[in-house]
Amino acid sequence: MAHSDLTLVPSGHLKPLDVISGFQVRPGFFLSPGTTVIPGGVNFTIQSHGAVSCELLLFHREAEEPFAVLKFPDTYRIGFVYSMIVFGLDIEEFEYAYRLDGPYEPEKGLCFDKTRILLDPYAKAVTGQSRWGCKNDLKHGYRARVVKNNFDWGDHKQPMIPMSDTIIYELHVRGFTKDTSSGVSHPGTFAGLMEKIPYLLDLGITTIELMPVFEFDEMRDCRLLDENQLLDYWGYNPVSFFAPNTSYASASEYNREGNELKQLIRECHANGLEVIFDVVFNHTAEGDERGPYISFKGFDNQIYYMLTPDGHYYNFSGCGNTLNCNHPVVQNLILDCLRYWVTEYRVDGFRFDLASILGRNEDGSPMSQPPLLQSLAFDSVLGRVKLIAEAWDAGGLYQVGSFPSWNRWAEWNGKYRDDMRRFLKGDSFMLHAAAQRIMGSPDLYPPEGRGSNASVNFLTCHDGFCLNDLYSYNAKHNEGNGWGNTDGTDENYSWNCGVEGETDDPSVLSLRLRMMKNAFTVLLCSRGTPMFLSGDEFGDTRYGNNNPYCQDNLVSWLDWSLLQKHQELHSFVQYMIAFRKRHPAIRMDLPSDRFSFPPMSVHGIHPWEPLSGQDSHILCVLFSGFDKGQEIQDTVYMAINSGWEPATLVLPDLPFEWGWHIAVNTGDSERTIFPDDQMPLVNHSVLLGERSVILFIVKRKSA
């Protein structure tokens, strides 16, 4: 027997190789799900609790029919795991998928069908829809590619920015640079985003949060409305959790395992920027009973999805199905997935879409100690990455302030968004709620618990009005989505400043600009981690659409020409980001205040007095402490007047040699921001204009 016909088995003895469909094979690595490249072969490992047999299908690239079908022998199965090494394969020349046989009893959740060709749940790269906006025309749907983990990270080092110092910038990879106004060489791709790193650095943000980059199907529910093609543009319908979206690469990446995404992350890290992924583990693109078989339905439908007692799909996601996250098999898959992104892509954190679903039991009921969330909180590989929950779901479970956290999870603070939107536009009875939100929401995140680092503060995100539209529209205008303007939330807490939509009225435009400056000032001077939507810094618009999930066009693409048109707003945001970085008293409690001020306190029109009546619109917050790092006293006083009448503001007393200086005054029609050496000195009081914010800092009068 030739040596090439032998293989070393774990016991150390040589055993003849088996031959299946003309390929030499042997039992594989049962503890390594997915595929692993080894010298001379490829290991294939999958698991299914309900299947009775499994076939591996090998396809030539883009071929309809497999060129080989390899059925796993019974001896290649341990427990519910099938594993086989196939020798003599060139990973550049084939794609693979599976077929599983088993019982078909939908009323019990069993949906095995031996005719279905299934994508590997652990696929690291997916084929079938590599060109954006082109339907997957393969009869057999998605297939996987085998990849090598051989990217050279060099002397790579991750930024590891504390939450208190983090400023998050949410963006859509395609929409960020797709418009020709972006001026990049590779619009709408990872490479295009990489070209914008200098812009991000100049803006001053620390962290980019990418909307879904997992492989997804933008052609799901594709439709034509008034000659406008509507796609599933946002990407919240994952096809494969382990694979980067192929159509976000600027060039074909066959078997190169997301190198372009890795290059983007490496370049971001080299420039001190973090990269957070928006991940979707609440549902998949397979939908409900009417949806396609892609992967999980055919592997173990009754395990991967939450099912009713009669085998139908619970729909806490609003997308047809709900992932059964707290089943041990699904827990392991999610943990393996996140560990993979952290170790192979060096991702800095994750924002979990509809994260309350991750805490539901298999019957849909909320759990007090969800094992998945606990496992993620204490996992060693994930120990230093950011974990951020969207602490609600489409089934009505709202957990802002009560999300199971083990002092590890942060949350999108939806109450900050809603309360501050209402306060800033002048609603009555919002004074005390606004004070709580600016101070880091201690009513939700007590200092003795998670504290303000748990609060991700935002006024805008991908879902809802962008900042320009927040002050340009009283109501949503989603007619272009094709649902009769019934989609998207009606609770926008917006104000059009007197005219609905676009206008040339200079007084309205001036007021809108001031409102946007107010919003950025308060957001960046609130305790907690600020986040804002890309394009808000230069007044990008979505023309009143507050749910542009299907708009792959100018509605969603950033219009970079507005950067020049709204340079004043952009410069203001740059200034405010730098201001936040210069003043640690805003971000955290500092010790040893030389003025005997508390680290953080709330004031009204007069200092140290209780807040005025609930219908008041004037709120002041004082941040103060001694910064040992810079050896300076750091004191910031933010005065907000969200009402429509000016008022005389009285400032806290200071020792004689110290004075209050204005750093920002959004109500000043001539100049709103002041360099350090040009800040006006204020005596005991100052006029606080209507609908304006003033920032004061303390400096020596002689400085």
Image (spheres, rainbow, N blue to C red):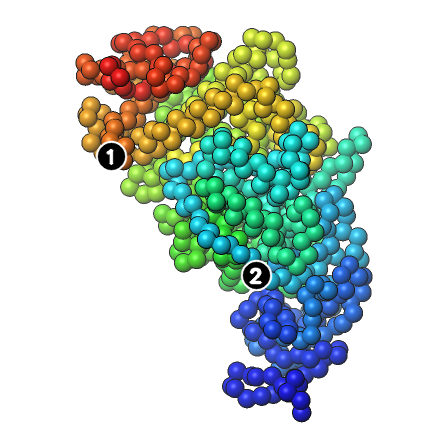
Decide: is 135 above or below 601: below
Residue 652 visible in the displayed image: no
10 Å crowding of disc 2: few (<14), some (14-19), many (20+): some
| Closest to the observer, 48 or 204 | 204
Residue 408 appears in view:
yes
Cα separation, mark 1 vs mark 2, equals 44 Å
SS assignment at label 2: loop
Write the residue at 60% across / 47% down.
213
Q: Quadrant of residue 655?
A: top left
Indicate left or right for 633 with 187 as reference.
left
| Residue visible at 67% across and 50% down in the picture | 246
Which image quarter: residue 371?
Answer: bottom left
How far across and how far down the image is residue 209, in percent? 52, 41
Residue 296 spot, x, y in % from top left: 64, 59
Left or right of 559: which side holds 517? Answer: left
Q: Quadrant of the N terminus?
A: bottom right
Q: Eyeballing the image, is 417 above or below 13? A: above
Specify few, some or many for label 1: CA neighbours under 10 Å numbering under 14, 14-19, or 20 or more. few
Q: Which residue is mark 2?
A: 149
Quarter of the view holding residue 481: top right
Residue 487 horizontal side relative to residue 679, left or right? right
What is the three-letter code of the residue carrying label 1?
Answer: Lys
Please report the residue visible at 52 percent of the width from the left and 23 percent of the height from the top. Answer: 570
Instruction: From the top left corner, tell me how far across and down residue 616 is, in percent.
Output: 38, 15
Check residue 558 in the rendering and tell me which mark sits there, or answer none: none
- Residue that badge 1 annotates: 628
Residue 414 x %, y %: 47, 34
* Residue type at the position of mark 2: Asn
Can you say which quadrant of the picture contains the C terminus? top left
